[in-house]
Amino acid sequence: DAKTTQPTSMDCAEGRAANLPCNHSTISGNEYVYWYRQIHSQGPQYIIHGLKNNETNEMASLIITEDRKSSTLILPHATLRDTAVYYCIVINDYKLSFGAGTTVTVRA
Amino acid sequence: EAQVTQNPRYLITVTGKKLTVTCSQNMNHEYMSWYRQDPGLGLRQIYYSMNVEVTDKGDVPEGYKVSRKEKRNFPLILESPSPNQTSLYFCASSPGGPADTQYFGPGTRLTVL
């Protein structure tokens, strides 16, 4: 699997958009980018995924660069309940590796 | 309700005493996997299973065993637990594989003294 690089932590103001970057410069053509989040010590929760086109769902938007070497998860209007660890993952074969993720703290 | 359940949720044990953490899903999922989570290291995959009787090692399989005799169950076995296996453990399942949405259990916090 391609490795991903994310910032260790970031803060965001409540009600503002949170933009979470992820680098995956060694991604292959058929590898998807997935985002999960983990609130406190609960099981991780799926957010969104994409291959090459931008994607949007009720939780977030995913912007993937044209060369697919990086992506950005956008939480359009962050709330205090969005405080969590966010994981960017690239998946191709049967294994799944989460890495350390980005700790996002939303402040009132 | 569609869910992944794990038991026990909390366990304190002593070195060398065999234990099993159960994982069960009611969604008829093919793929199941186990992870451990330690501070600063994210989630690391221990074992995964693509289907009944098909299991394979993840990134950190040493000291663990698994079995998949039925589709719904995927127990994690520690034959001789050691203190470095103190961790938070998660089981997950998905319809077809790792590229499908993973559904995680609530976690099992294990302490080995």
Image (spheres, helix red, strand yellow):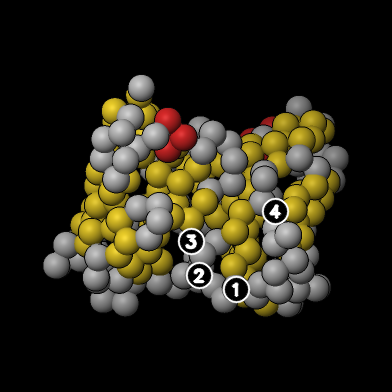
* Of pointers 2 and 4, the one earlier in the residue sequence: 4
Residue toward you, B18 or B2: B2
Mark 3 closeness class: few <14, some 14–19, many ≥20 residues within 10 Å: many
CA gap, disc 3 to disc 4? 17 Å
Q: Which residue is mark 3?
A: A96
Q: Which secondary structure lies at badge 1?
A: loop
Q: Is residue B83 above or below residue B6?
A: above
Q: Which residue is mark 2?
A: B100
At label 1, the amino acid type is: Pro
Q: Nearer the viewer, mark 1 or mark 3?
A: 1
At label 3, the amino acid type is: Leu
The label number, if any, that marks residue B95 in the structure image: 1
| Residue B24 located left or right of residue A74 | right
Is mark 3 in CB contact (under 8 Å) with mark 4?
Answer: no
The label number, if any, that marks residue A81 in the structure image: none
Q: Position of residue B61 (x, y in %)?
A: 61, 56
Chain of the residue that carries numbered disc 3 in the rendered image? A
Q: Nearer the viewer, mark 2 or mark 4?
A: 2
